[in-house]
Amino acid sequence: MTAIPIELEAPDIEPHRHSSTGVDWVHTFDSGRPGPHAMIAALTHGNEICGAIVLDRLLRDGLRPERGKLTLAFNNVAAFHRFDTRNPYASRFVDEDFNRVWTRETLDGPRRSTELDRARELRRFVEAADFLLDIHSMLEPSPAVMISGPLEKGIRFAFDVGVPEHVVSDVGHANGTRMRDYGGFGDPASDKNALLVECGQHWERNAERVAWQVAWRFLKCAGVVSGERAAREIEQPVAPQKLVRVTEAVIASTPGFRFARSFTGMEVVPRRGDVIAWDGEAPVRAPYDNCVLVMPVPNNVKTGLTAVRLGRIEPR
Ligand SMILES: [Zn+2]
């Protein structure tokens, strides 16, 4: 794997440990005025530090909601505390992926792990939130991507937020349910809404800027800060957004899986039948024209795991 420079510095979040919520690293502020409950989460994966930088800044700046309530949560702090710039890949989680345990059955079940214990602490906040933004970043260099989930309400929310350029609608992962799909967020009949943003490569400077922009636009759309307050932070987007709907995952079925050329994510393969990759001797071909490669993992594809997801650009 190519070494990726670490341009961001993991913040000292120790000042944010104690909280009146009774749960460490989770802060809720009540404006005292009616309104929605918005929640921003960081460190769902312990080595994705751009979101922690944003929450640290918001907390140090003393941000308070003007309406409703605001919760700011550092999720997998146990994994984050293992973050080490000499081995930054190691601290994604401690026992299991925090972002695959979000079903009532799993949370109510008997199993225990570092992440499940933490998810059980976070659960009441996630259930109380009307709007959730979960801030992530990616292992491989790639343009930022908003993951809207499968429902129209999530797609609409992503376009209301207005950045980043790429909105990806997907159904999540076969190996567990994400926080953004939990409970009312995954229910088309509920008004609750959630987004997950991938701000770019984990440790690139730009990921912090993307996270800050998305966070302020989210706070404004959720209605907990005024447009005037948010306008002091928000930059104008440079590109119109486009919607990519994931149609399928390409699973590496041999150790010889390799991409036909180096892809960095969100590239458009123009023609149906074009070779995207080789799985051993077998070509993997684009199933339709203008096929978008969503978050390819070229450097560490393991047999049986997803190498890339394919998506169609849909007009909005
Ligand atoms: Zn992540």
Image: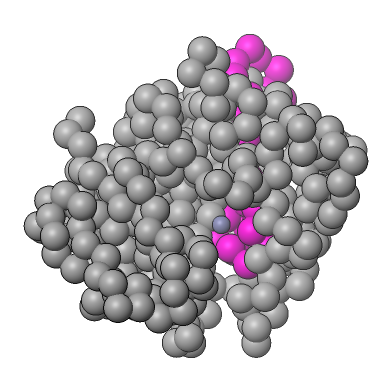
Q: Quadrant of residue 162?
A: top left
Q: Quadrant where the C terminus lies?
A: top left
Q: Looking at the picture, does residue 82 appear above or below residue 290? A: below
* The stretch drawn in magenta includes residue 49: yes
- Identify the residue at image location x=59%, y=64%: 49
Q: Is residue 303 left or right of residue 61?
A: left
Q: Looking at the picture, does residue 295 appear above or below residue 191? A: below
Residue occupying the far front of the picture: 281
- Identify the residue at image location x=65%, y=14%: 33
Residue 95 in percent (x, y) is at 78, 62
Q: Is residue 111 left or right of residue 266?
A: right
Residue 101 in percent (x, y) is at 70, 44
Q: Looking at the picture, does residue 170 appear above or below residue 222? A: below
Number of marks:
0
Residue 172 in percent (x, y) is at 50, 43
Colour scheme: one colour
Of the four image quadrants, the one with ligand 1 is bottom right
Q: Quadrant of residue 167?
A: top left
Q: Is residue 46 left or right of residue 105?
A: left
Q: Looking at the picture, does residue 110 appear above or below residue 75? A: above
Is any part of residue 201 visible from this angle? no
**Image: magenta residue range:** 30-52
Is any part of residue 79 visible from this angle? yes
Residue 7 in percent (x, y) is at 50, 77
- Identify the residue at image location x=34%, y=44%: 246
Q: Is residue 229 left or right of residue 244?
A: right
Residue occupying the far left of the picture: 271
- Identify the residue at image location x=71%, y=17%: 32
- Which is more toward the observer, 201 or 8? 201
- Which is more toward the observer, 293 or 174? 174
* The stretch drawn in magenta includes residue 211: no
